[in-house]
Amino acid sequence: MSRPLKISASVLAADFTRLGEEVAAVDRAGSDWIHVDIMDGRFVPDISFGPSVVKAIRRSTRKPLNLHLMIVEPERSLQRYRDAGADHLLVQAEPGSTVHLHRVLSQVRELGCRPGVVIDPATPIMWIEHVLHLVDIVLVMTVNPGFGGQAFLPEMLPKIAALRTLARERGLDFHIEVDGGQDADTIRRSTEAGADVIVAGTAIFGALDYAGKIAEMRACAHTSTSPTKG
Ligand code: DX5
Ligand code: ZN
């Protein structure tokens, strides 16, 4: 059975003056998840959204909210993001974000959200080897975090492939999500390497026809043979 590709539209690239309409539009256009980048001005230079904006996004869609926490000490605000309506809480693996990664991922599960771990381009897989059994999603950054519209880093492809191999060897069934610089060609290469969830901001919100763009992205994906997971 093939694992269907999931698209997670990143609202960072939306027109914020019409945030609710934009979220509803990508929902209607067929985005499977809605990717929400939380930036605190410390882990990354910019500040984006907090829980009150997540609450507003929650009112605009029933699709899973895929929260990417680019923040220092996520353990201090997990509950607020859960209460705001997050479905997935993705925590950066680097100690510059959280010191006790294993504990934080367990807390996400206890709060009733799906845990995910995120690795920056410079972060090796070895760093998350001992928490893979705790997560539903591994997010491989294919750009350095902090900004939309950057160019895809092809040197991340072997990392995606190694992660897919590791999952197979250990019998683990997490999603491999990729984030940054994703469009037709990089989707093809990322899915060939083993990714099954694509985050895309600029490519979707920069298109005139969101539904057409999302359909085009799906058509570019390489079909894998892994089992399906919802
Ligand atoms: C970058 C964010 C991404 C960003 C991707 O730090 O994590 O989610 O929105 O944007 P594009 O698709 O423009 O590379
Ligand atoms: Zn992101």
Image (tube, helix red, strand yellow):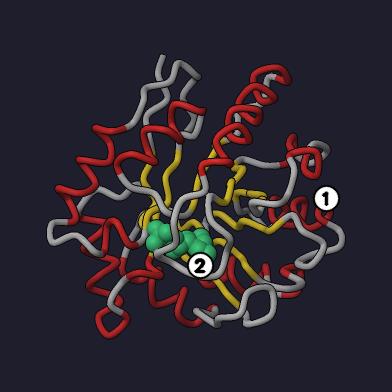
Residue 173 in picture, x, y percent from top left: 61, 28
Point 41% across, 14% down: residue: 1
Placement of 229 over or under 51, stated as above or below? above
Name the quarter showing ligand 1. Answer: bottom left
Point 27% across, 85% down: residue: 17
Q: Secondary structure at mark 1?
A: helix
Identify the residue position indicated by label 2 in the image: 37
Label whose residue precedes the other's in the sequence (2 or 1): 2
Q: Is residue 93 left or right of residue 219?
A: right
Placement of 169 over or under 102, stated as above or below? above
Q: Residue furthest bottom?
A: 17
Q: Residues within 10 Å of mark 1 (few under 14, many from 20)?
A: some
Res 192 seen here: yes
Disc number lying in front (2 or 1): 2
Residue 63 in picture, x, y percent from top left: 36, 54
Q: For this rendering, which residue is in front, 24 or 182?
A: 182
Point out which mark residue 207 bears: none
Q: Is residue 14 left or right of residue 49?
A: left
Say which quarter of the image contains residue 135. Answer: top right
Q: Amino acid at mark 2?
A: Asp
Placement of 78 over or under 163, stated as above or below? below
Q: Is residue 185 left or right of residue 211?
A: right
What is the spatial separation of the Cα atoms under label 2 and label 1, in whole angstroms? 22 Å
Residue 163 in picture, x, y percent from top left: 65, 31
Q: Residues within 10 Å of mark 2 (few under 14, many from 20)?
A: many
Say which quarter of the image contains residue 170. Answer: top right
Point out which mark residue 102 bears: 1
Point 47% across, 74% down: residue: 54
Mark 2, ligand 2, within 8 Å: the answer is yes
Say which quarter of the image contains residue 130. Answer: top right
Q: Secondary structure at mark 2?
A: strand
